[in-house]
């Protein structure tokens, strides 16, 4: 499903797309269907890139070297119908393994593809469907990771797949205490039921629609960071060591407002926790160091103040329509205080791009038997240097902004897949006009 492009793409009257066609490959796909898929992924050891294209009856696998020149390929018949590609991993021999998930049978077919012989081998993986359900999946260091939640015990189960072996890691939260917004005891499973885990994409801009979530999962090299922000008063943070499975808990008090808080949230970024708290009278933002819990930066803005550190207007946007500007801080805080708020931090080569804002879901009535809802976003951008000092730089479009704008304006783009590669992004897709698989490179900034 095509994503709505980021708001930056519609703020600027003219955005140079800054894209370059890297490679093309002819494909015989008559009419792309929803079940067809393209998956681009990188071997983080060799920096080779694989494009896996599946359509109706056949699949095509293309192997590119680190300069994105085609070095090998093979095709075959799709044997696993009614399944979707869930992820990938690489074996030590450099061959890729793909994970085919069935929503019906709730199992995964693991298929390793051998370029040398143009063959494949398959295994089936079944998790305990009666006692677990899938939370999310992700790739890390050439492994495929499946995270499930136990239905009754306070535990998450991480399955790590590599070289045809699966390792089970149980993340046990039995020893920790949890409370609801009214400080009444509540179980770990109840918290996650009310506030499901939202996985943050490492090294990418995570939009408001994701960061307003109250439970976030951050992927580090050999750790997971899990933050809970269901309480207005604090952020409950769990640092999970994946080597020894030890879990360390930290509690970070939210910045205290003179008025009753309406909404609060946090965002983890490079050993720092950004905490935001708001009501109709004030906006507060604290940056705290994770290891010492000391406050590195503290900002308070009242409704009568001008937000002097913003690098964009105060904006309100309904669905994917063009944003409009709010006249003053009071109107911004009034809108923000009735929203689910969040903060997002993205690092470029020299700066931090920070979005502060919120989202509301507004009921628009019914279309027959189906409810119609509209998303309203309220936000502004601020750009800091890496010493956490404000800058006056103009916000420039990110590579992802350009990609979503490109897809929105080019209806020939089908089966699209976005991959982070080196210091840029690659959009891989089937071009319905030229009948080719195409890779385009997008970079941050104006060109």
Image (cartoon, rainbow, N blue to C red):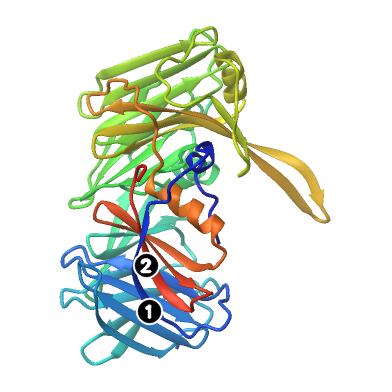
The residue located at (39%, 18%) in the rendering is: 309
What x and y, as percent, mark residue 311? 42, 25
Query: What mark, if any, has residue 439 been given in the picture?
Result: 2
The residue located at (23%, 67%) in the rendering is: 43
Viewer-nearest residue: 368 or 435: 435
First in residue order: circle 1 vs circle 2: 1
Q: Is residue 210 visible?
A: yes
Q: Secondary structure at mark 2?
A: strand
Q: Residue 310: which quarter of the image?
A: top left
What x and y, as percent, mark residue 16? 43, 47
User: Contact (CB < 8 A) between labels 1 and 2?
Assistant: no
Quarter in which the N terminus is drawn: bottom right
Q: Is residue 183 above or below residue 55?
A: above
Q: Residues within 10 Å of mark 2 (few under 14, many from 20)?
A: many
Q: Report the label total.
A: 2
Q: Which residue is mark 1?
A: 25
Q: Is residue 147 visible?
A: no
What x and y, as percent, mark residue 326? 60, 22
Calculate the distance from the C-alpha at mark 1 to the C-alpha at mark 2. 9 Å
Q: Is residue 74 above or below residue 371?
A: below
The residue located at (61%, 17%) in the rendering is: 331
Q: Is residue 124 left or right of residue 336?
A: left
């Amino acid at each position: 499903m095509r994503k709505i492009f980021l708001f930056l793409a519609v703020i600027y009257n003219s955005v140079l797309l800054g894209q370059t066609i890297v490679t093309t490959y002819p494909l015989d796909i008559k009419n792309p269907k929803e079940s067809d898929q393209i998956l681009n992924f990188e071997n983080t050891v060799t920096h080779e890139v694989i494009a896996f294209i599946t359509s109706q009856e056949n699949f095509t696998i293309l192997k590119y070297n680190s300069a994105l020149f085609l070095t090998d390929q093979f095709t075959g018949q799709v044997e696993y119908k009614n399944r979707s590609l869930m992820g990938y991993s690489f074996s030590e021999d450099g061959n890729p393994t793909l994970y085919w998930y069935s929503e019906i049978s709730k199992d995964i077919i693991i298929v390793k593809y051998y370029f040398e012989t143009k063959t494949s081998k398959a295994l089936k993986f079944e998790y305990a469907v009666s006692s677990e359900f899938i939370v999310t999946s992700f790739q890390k260091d050439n492994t495929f990771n499946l995270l499930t939640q136990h239905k009754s015990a306070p535990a998450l189960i991480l399955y790590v797949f590599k070289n045809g072996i699966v390792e089970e890691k149980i993340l046990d939260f039995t020893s920790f205490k949890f409370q609801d917004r009214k400080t009444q005891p509540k179980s770990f499973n109840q918290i996650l039921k009310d506030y499901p885990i939202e996985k943050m994409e490492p090294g990418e801009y995570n939009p408001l629609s994701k960061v307003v979530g109250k439970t976030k999962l951050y992927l580090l090299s050999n750790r997971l960071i899990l933050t809970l922000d269901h309480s207005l008063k604090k952020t409950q943070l769990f640092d999970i060591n994946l080597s020894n499975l030890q879990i360390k808990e930290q509690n970070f008090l939210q910045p205290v407002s003179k008025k009753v808080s309406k909404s609060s949230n946090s965002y983890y970024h490079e050993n720092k926790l950004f905490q935001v708290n708001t009501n109709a009278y004030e906006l507060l933002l604290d940056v705290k160091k994770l290891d010492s819990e000391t406050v590195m930066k503290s900002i308070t803005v009242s409704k009568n103040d001008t937000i002097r550190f913003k690098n964009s207007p105060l904006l309100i946007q309904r669905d994917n329509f063009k944003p409009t500007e709010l006249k003053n801080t009071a109107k911004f805080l009034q809108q923000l205080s009735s929203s689910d708020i969040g903060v997002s931090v993205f690092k470029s080569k020299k700066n931090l791009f920070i979005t502060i804002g919120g989202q509301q879901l507004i009921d628009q009535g019914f279309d027959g038997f189906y409810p119609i809802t509209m998303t309203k976003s309220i936000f502004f951008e601020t750009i800091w240097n890496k010493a956490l000092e404000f800058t006056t730089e103009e916000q420039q479009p990110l590579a992802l902004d350009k990609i979503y704008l490109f897809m929105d304006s080019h209806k020939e783009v089908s089966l699209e897949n976005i991959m982070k590669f080196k210091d840029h992004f690659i959009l891989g897709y089937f071009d319905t006009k030229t009948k080719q698989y195409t890779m385009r490179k997008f970079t941050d900034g104006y060109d």
